[in-house]
Every structure is written in structure tokens, then in C-alpha cells.
Image (spheres, grey):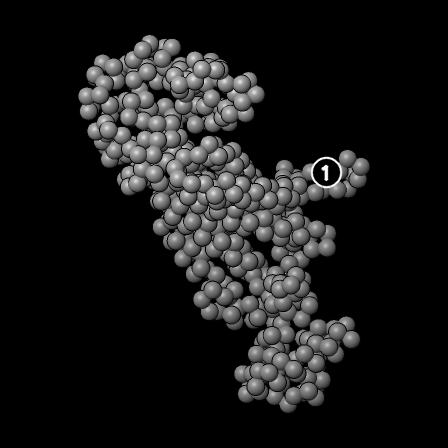
Amino acid sequence: MKLWGGRFEKDTDALVEDFHSSIAFDQRLYKHDISGSIAHARMLGRIGVLTSEEAQKIIEGLGIILQEIEQGSVQFEVGAEDIHMNIEKLLTEKIGEIGKKLHTGRSRNDQVALDFRLFLREEMDNTKELLIKLIDTLLQLSDKHLLTWMPGYTHLQKAQPISFSHHLMAYIQMFLRDLGRLKDARKRLNLSPLGSGALAGTTFPLRREEIADELGFDGITLNSLDGVSDRDFALEFLSSAAILMMHLSRLCEELIIWSTGEFSFVVIDDAYATGSSIMPQKKNPDVAELVRGKTGRVYGDLITLLTVMKGLPLAYNKDMQEDKECVFDAIDTIQKSLLVMEPMIATMQVNKIIMAEEAKKGFTNATDLADYLAKKGIPFRDSHEIVGKLVLDCSKKRCALEDLTLQELREVSKVFENDLFEAISLDYCVKSRNIPGGPAPESVKEAIHLSRTQLAKLKW
């Protein structure tokens, strides 16, 4: 008989039983459900709803069930619907009628809200550790490549020379923001809804603050309707996860481009690439491509929950059973992506010589030549036009700006002097941009230091 079956005269249809049940996926909450139930039983004992012996018997029974689940000796039942009722049923079978007292002062509505918060808090902490490891790896790589020049791009066209370190630091800023978003979302998640009941609290004198403190929460939810119907904490996580996956995808896109024969900026380690079943020469960046592809899954997970929640009246509705699979999928996807990204980046080879050679091409020093003229007193708009015409001329001659002779340059403008050749050299182009946030080695070194400081502050 169902634990809620008192007012029903007929059994649930078999098709509905299967459709209605969530145990196939919410069994992942077993640890958190048992933790919440142990804390609830202990509190019921403290306020006298249970005797100390009853509370202890329930706590011991739940501890045994936890061990049995982790040993793989428990078979969950579809008929018991969800993880909460499966565990309650197992408890009653194990310790008898006392097990039926555990649910006093509690509804599945506040129980699942509690379990979900406990689960997601733990997984956010796990995600944080993986993200920190990736950021650390990128910071180490940035430290190594302060003097590795490469072309910077806009519109995927060569634009200006920068350092590889400076390029990597852009991603570090993105990932630091991701870490900040996770930290902020965790703060709002970390309130206990237990005691909200089905929607209107309970007549039992529950000590909500005590149980919240015991479970590591910062406080309690202040409205029982909101306590059971709020899934903002899950949406915030999914939103943060979607943005993080977008950043991973952008980095993967560049790794894929850089590892092509046309670029050859990096070489992906064999352990993180695959071959072709027909073309013996192929080495494909499949890991990076998969991360790029899996980003769409996490976007879908966010849209799924937003759509589930968008039209729901207060308080709990069965639609909200659909909140878990999308969150589980996002967690699995993002953690696997972070797990594989970090060693792939740590082991890749960086072709410094090729990067520097390519940085010299495509007139990446054209802006510096225009700046040179502007510093000599020519209005920048006029400088821009002069250099544009020089670039057009060099394109036709198939030469670089630095290949032009001083005499050729002075035919265009008399302000050109011998010092212009240093001003448009690759080293000078990068090193002279020594302002905060710029690509000069000193600036990047300071940015690395500040980023490490920021990273330390973002840990929790």
C-alpha cells in the first residue's frame, strides 16, 4: 500500500506507476535524504516528539540503510515512487512501526527541497575544485609564455601582436567570473527549507534554525510557500554552468583552430586526440570538439528548467519533479568537461617559433606605425589613412611594412625617421603596450599576480 494511500479506493495504474516514479534518477539524492532525515529525527527527539530511544533507533536504522545502499545491496522499488519513500519504506521494514514516526512535521515537499539543496551545494563545491585546478594550470602556462609572441585577432583576421600569456589571461578572467558566479549562487542556495511542510509549515514546534545549523546552512527560508516552490538556486547554478560551458567552448574552438596544419600554434597531446578509421594521417582534436558540442546540452538543461518553472502557481506542483534530471545532466557534463580540459591544456605543446613568425605577418604592426606618426604630431585620422595606403602598396608588392626603405616611406611623409623601424618591430609592438590590462610582459605579470590574489578570495 502507498504511504499516501488512505483516501484511495483503487491501485495506481501500472502505466501511471512507471510514469509517475522518479526513483530511476532521484536515487542520486540518497545520501542527502538520509543526512536530512537523521538531522530531522535528532531534532524530533530534542523537542520530545520522539523519545530519545526512538530517535536513536531511527538514526541507527538510517545509518545501516546508508551503508547498504553504498554497498550496492539495496534494490529500490518503482512502486515506492521516489528516494524519500523508498528510504522510509526500507526504514520501517528494518526497525518496525517506529520508522513511520520519522515523517512527523515534515512533507515530501520540504524534504525534496532540502535534499536538492544539499546535493547541489556539494556538487557546486566539487565543480569549484575542478575549475580552480583549470585556472591554476592556465596561470602556470601564462607564467611560462610572457615572452611568447603571437598574432592577436579580430574577425579571425590578424590584428595586432600580443603574447600567448596575454591571450590565456583573457580566459582566466572569464573563469574567475565563473567562479564568482558559483560562489554567489551557493550563498543564495545555502538556506534550509526544512520546516516549510507541504506549503504552510507545521504545528509541531520544530527548531528550524538548529537543524539548519547542523546541516551546514547559513540560515532558513523565511516563507513556507517559497521554501517548497523555489528552484531559483537550481536555475542560478544552471545559468552559471551554461556561461562556464560557453567559455570552455570558446577556448576549445581556439585550440581546434590552433592545432590545424594551417595554424600549427599548438600540438594536442596524443592522449587527448583520436584518429580516423580510414585516413591514417589524421589526428583529430575530439576532446575539444566534444566539449564544444556538449555546451549545447547545458544550454538545453537551463532552458528545460526555466520552461518547467515559468507558469507554475504556488506552491509545489508535480511538474517540479522535472527539475532534477536537467541539473544532474549539467553537473555531469560540466564536471567531465573540466576534468578532461585541464590535463589536455597542461600537456599540449606550444610552438613559440611558429606563433612569432605568424605575428610578423598580416601587417599586425600597422597600428604601431600609425601611432608613430601620431606621436610626431600628425592627426591620428591622417596617420591612419597614410598607413592604410602603405599597407595597400605593400600588399601589391607582397612585402611587409618593415621591408620598405626609409626613402620610400619619406616619399609618403617627411616625418619618418630611422627610429620608426624599432617602433614597428615585433618586440617593441608588444612591450610598449605597458598599461594595466595590456600585453606587455610587465603588465601581464602584474595581471597574473592580481588574478592569483582574486582566486584566493573567491575560494570558499
- Relative height, residue 79 to residue 349 (above, below): above
Q: Give the residue drawn at x 57%, y 64%.
A: 162
The residue lying toward the viewer, choosing from 16 and 231, is 16
Whether residue 409 appears in this view of the structure is yes
Horizontal side of 4 relative to 218 (left or right) equals right
The residue lying toward the viewer, choosing from 393 and 196, is 196
- Relative height, residue 127 to residue 173 (above, below): above
Name the residue beneath numbered marker 1.
275
Q: Give the residue drawn at x 73%, y 52%.
A: 261
Number of numbered callouts drawn: 1
- Residue extending farthest bottom: 414
Tell me where residue 221 appears, x and y as whole percent: 30, 40
- Relative height, residue 453 to residue 234 (above, below): below
The residue lying toward the viewer, choosing from 212 and 168, is 212
Q: Given the image, on which type of amino acid does mark 1 rest?
A: Gly
Q: Quadrant of residue 389?
A: bottom right
Tell me where residue 16 appears, x and y as whole percent: 54, 22
